[in-house]
Structure formats: structure tokens, C-alpha cells
Amino acid sequence: MTNGVEAIDIRNQTITTTPGFRQQTSVVKYDHLVLALGNVTDFRGLRGLPEHAIPFKNLSDALYIRNHVIHVLEEAAIEHEDERLRRQLLTFVVAGGGFSGVEVVAEINDFVHRVIRNYPQIDPAEVRVVLLHGQGRILPELDEKLALYAQKLLIKRGVEIQLNSRLEAATGDEAILKSGERILTQDADFHGALVAESADRHNRST
């Protein structure tokens, strides 16, 4: 059920939801009530990310990224005059090597290399998928052995992993790292390929 909640009756253990397809509220009984307040994407201190990065937090974000990647590949397939733009279009940067960041970069990498079979104008060697992470290994939530296994697997599949690298800012043309390195990637609003793991505490300065 995805309806909103209008009221909670603790004594009678019921929840009153907002109207859905029906023109009236519904009352749902519960045995246990869990209040999950969720979170918000936190780009504080990261210049340009609200304007130029795609957050990844829910299903709609995932669908947007999928459609966006297809659009980027279509644009790259017909771009033959501007080499710099073509490199930007075919560079995908994911910031944050936690669970969601690793999942996103793996899915983008697999999806792009599967889809470009339909675009003979694109050489697979032109595609660059980059994962930025602010620590010495990805997936700090996991046991080191498992994390290193995942790390080696991503590298084997062609993902470029930059460890101890923090994303500091983004422009319409580049992802800017704290080290000063700049990675060409287009603005997420029209040809974007910069994805930020939402509220990624591992990609922040300490």
C-alpha cells in the first residue's frame, strides 16, 4: 500500500489512510507499527551536485537513470564532430562506494555494455565507468574479504575504481575531485552521467 497516512489510533491499533482510487479513507488494523521516517539527499558542502548530479534513493531514480543512460548512448552514437563531448557522454561517474553506490555502478556498467551492442557506432572501449570512494576499499559495511572480492569483480568487469577519492563539486562539464582531478562528464540535466549515492557518509571528508 502506498497511500499516505491521515491518522494513527494507538489504542485501537488502526491506521487511517488517505483516499486512493476510492473516494474515501481506509482504516487498516495492525499488530505492530513501525514508523520509518526515511531520509533526504544530503549534498551540503558539495558544490554543483544539486544541479548536476542524479541522486539514487528510490525506484523512480533508478528508472530515470536507466532512461537517461539510453538517451546518452543515443546522443553519443550520432556525435562524430565533437570528440570532447563524445567522451563526456560516454563517461559515467558514480560517487560513493557503499551498498547503493556499488549496486548502481555495477548495474550501469552491465547495462551500458549490454545495450551498446545496438549501437555499432560506439566502440565498447570508449565507455568509461568510474566509481569514486573516499576510503581505502569499497563496501566498508562488509567483511574485508567480501569487500575486496566485490572490488576485484568490478575491476574485472571494466569498472574504474578510484579509492581515497572524494567528489568535491560538479559543473555542467566535469566531476571535480578533492585532489583537483577533473573527470569529463556532462550535466545530468541534459546529458548527465554523474550519479551520487544519497547521503553517502563514506564519501565525505572527516
Image (tube, helix red, strand yellow):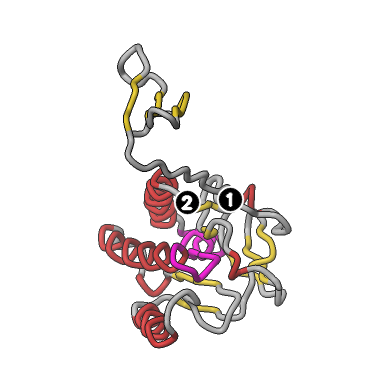
Q: Which residue is mark 2?
A: 57
- Residue 94 part of the magenta segment: yes
Quadrant location of the C terminus in the rendered image: bottom right
Q: Amino acid at mark 2?
A: Lys
Q: Which residues are magenta?
A: 80-100
Residue with the most extreme front position? 11
C-alpha distance separating marks 1 and 2: 8 Å
Q: Which residue is mark 1?
A: 41
Q: Is residue 52 left or right of residue 27?
A: right
Cβ–Cβ under 8 Å for marks 1 and 2: yes
Figure check: 198 above or below 146:
above
Residue at coordinates 39% horizontally, 55% vertically from top-left?
A: 73
Question: Residue 127's x, y, as percent?
Answer: 42, 69
Q: Is residue 12 left or right of residue 196?
A: left
Q: Amino acid at mark 1?
A: Thr
What element does badge 1 sit on?
Answer: loop
Q: Is residue 106 left or right of residue 199?
A: left
- Residue 38 part of the magenta segment: no
Residue placed most toward the observer, 133 or 52: 133
How packed mark 2 is, by other alpha carbons closer than 10 Å (few <14, some 14-19, many 20 or more), is: some
Residue at coordinates 63% horizontally, 53% vertically from top-left?
A: 42
Residue at coordinates 58% horizontally, 79% vertically from top-left?
A: 135
Question: Residue 99's x, y, as percent?
Answer: 44, 67
Figure check: 23 above or below 10:
above
Question: Residue 143's x, y, as percent?
Answer: 42, 82
Residue 144 image-quadrant placement: bottom left
Figure check: 170 above or below 37:
below
